[in-house]
Structures are given as structure tokens and as C-alpha cells.
Amino acid sequence: MSDKNKSTTFQHTWLDEDGVAQPGTFTAKRLSVMERSKLATRRSQLSGGMYCVRDDDGKPTGQGIDPQTDYINTMIAHLEISLIQKPIWFKFEELTDMGLVGEVYDKVIDFEMTFFRRRDRSAADGSQLGSSSSESDSGEESEVAQPNHAATQVVGKEVQAALDA
């Protein structure tokens, strides 16, 4: 893999609480398998080991942590691990603007998704026969298209049922 595929650098200007423009340079790296595991562990730490319990249709059941907190923890964990350069003012302990965090997170995810799209194009032309694509034959997305899917379920349904009992 060439160096240009290992990271991306982008500019983002944030208007702070006083309306002052704070320009910044961010660099995000492509996550390895081990880093994805660390991401899931960090997300679980931020959530106190809890997760947002969802039904078979993916809708929150009201058990566990709320979906907003789950998403905030996902963004924080992901950015803590993937950002290798960030402006001095980008400190989670001091930021109050969730919109800013979401905008930076979206740019990082857009970068990561380019690797999944590239794999999809290769599979479509037959150059990667036998490899996973982002969509199954049924048209549903697989885990390849959802890099954080493994982190959304901390324990299986059977284990959770035993814990709830």
C-alpha cells in the first residue's frame, strides 16, 4: 500500500463560542485490524461496558444507554484512535460543540469508506473473486460496509438475556 493510502489530511475551520474562526489541520490514518479492535474496546470503556440495546429491526428498545450517547462514544473513540494530527483546540475534554465533532468524524469516515468502495469496484469487475463486497446477494449491507458493526454488540443475545434475568 502506498503512503497516500495510509492517511488523509484535511482543513476544517471552527467558529468557537465567541464567533472567532479557529482553523485547523487534521490528519487521519487508515485503521488496521488491531486498531479497530482497540476502537471497539475504547467505545465500550466510554460507555461503561453498556451499549444501546436494539430489537431485530435495529430500533432502540430503551434498555442500555440511549442511542445519542452510544453515537457520541462511537465518534470519540474513533477520532481518538484515527486522528494522528489535530489542532491544539480540538480537545474532547474542552469542546462543547457536538456539531464540530460530527463534522470531523464524517470526514474521517468518508476517507475510510473509499477503501470499501474501491474493494466493491474490484469485486464488480471480477478482479477479487471470493472476496467480500459491501452488499450481499439479498441487497443488504454486510459488515464490510459498516466498519463499526462489531462494536455495536458487546455481548450476544443469550448472554444479555442471562444478565437481565
Image (cartoon, grey):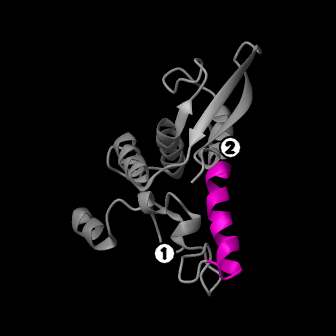
As shown in the figure, which amino acid type bears the numbered disc 2?
Lys
Q: Residues within 10 Å of mark 2 (few under 14, many from 20)?
A: some
The location of residue 123, given as percent across then percent down, is 64, 77
Q: On screen, 162 above or below 79?
A: below
Q: On screen, 54 above or below 107?
A: below
Q: Name the residue under label 2.
A: 107
Q: On screen, 25 above or below 4?
A: above
| Rendered-image quadrant of the N terminus | bottom right
SS under mark 1: loop
Residue at horizontal 50 percent and vertical 38 percent from the top: 76
161 horizontally vs 152: left or right: left
Q: Which of 44 and 129 is in front in this view?
A: 129
As shown in the figure, which amino acid type bears the numbered disc 1?
Asp
* Magenta region, residue range: 109-127
Q: Mark 1 points at which residue?
A: 56
The location of residue 32, given as percent across then percent down, is 45, 52
| Res. 97 image quadrant | top right
